[in-house]
Image: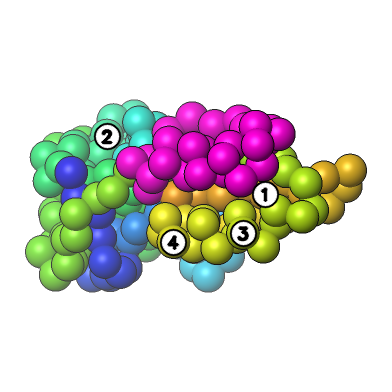
Amino acid sequence: MYSLAHPVTSSLEIRKSRFLACVEPIADRAAAQARVDALRAEHPGCAHVCWALLAGGHSAAVDDGEPSGTAGRPMLDVLRHQQLDGVLATVVRYFGGVKLGAGGLVRAYTDAVAQALLQAEKIEHIPSQTLNCELAYAHEGVARNLIAEQGGELLEVSHGQAVRLQVRLPASATEPLREQLMSITRGELGWEAEGQGE
């Protein structure tokens, strides 16, 4: 599986309609939805913002008012065909006054995403996992160091009765981190792994 190193955009004009495509790395559905909302705000005059997502076993194909199956699904098929994961494809369409028909729309959305992907730098996709752990204040510093060593990213830290850390890290590093934390806390560790992410 592959992801993308950074976002790539391209545009296509077909019978006066403009199709602005973007393919970009994205963590999950919530981040994808936020990105789509931002595109709507950036392009208030557009007719449609169609999108497709493949991220950690979650997929989405949204036609946004285009005839069913003519936009989101073909875009998703392109992502699947290229063995991508953790990727969002969006196409902003400005309607040019000429209807393209169902076949024309499928081709337009497929081509727009495929064209953007031609310029994209693919990188190996490393599945990640999000987890929550809870430990005594005395162990917070060591825990932060171990998380960094394992290539993890702290998403959230809260301080209550104990320190609660929300971490995203490569799935392969989850078990080694748990074992190290169990060792330093002498087993006094709250541990909860969320679904496989990205």
Q: Quadrant of the N terminus?
A: top left
Front: mark 4 or 1: 4
Label 2 vs 1, first from the N-terminus: 2
Amino acid type of the residue that numbered disc 1 sits on in the rendered structure: Leu
Identify which residue, 160 or 197, lies in the foreground.
160
- In the image, which disc is placed on residue 142? 3
Task: Work out whether 185 lies above or below 122.
Answer: above
Q: Which residue is mark 2?
A: 73
- In the image, which disc is placed on residue 165? 1
Instruction: Provide residue 14's location: percent of width, then percent of height.
Output: 17, 61
Label 2 vs 4, first from the N-terminus: 2
Q: Are there few (<14), some (14-19), or many (20+) residues within 10 Å of tag 3?
A: few
Residue depicted at x 27% and y 34%: 73
Label 3 vs 2, first from the N-terminus: 2
Do residues under tags 2 and 1 come within 8 Å of each other at their CB atoms? Answer: no
Amino acid type of the residue that numbered disc 3 sits on in the rendered structure: Val
- In the image, which disc is placed on residue 149? 4
Instruction: Provide residue 174's location: percent of width, then percent of height.
Output: 44, 40
Give how far apart the Cα atoms at labels 4 and 1 are: 15 Å
Instruction: Provide residue 106's location: percent of width, then percent of height.
Output: 18, 41
Task: Work out whether 44 lies above or below 113.
Answer: below
Q: Which residues are magenta?
A: 170-197
Give how far apart the Cα atoms at labels 3 and 2 are: 46 Å
Image quadrant assignment for residue 172: top left
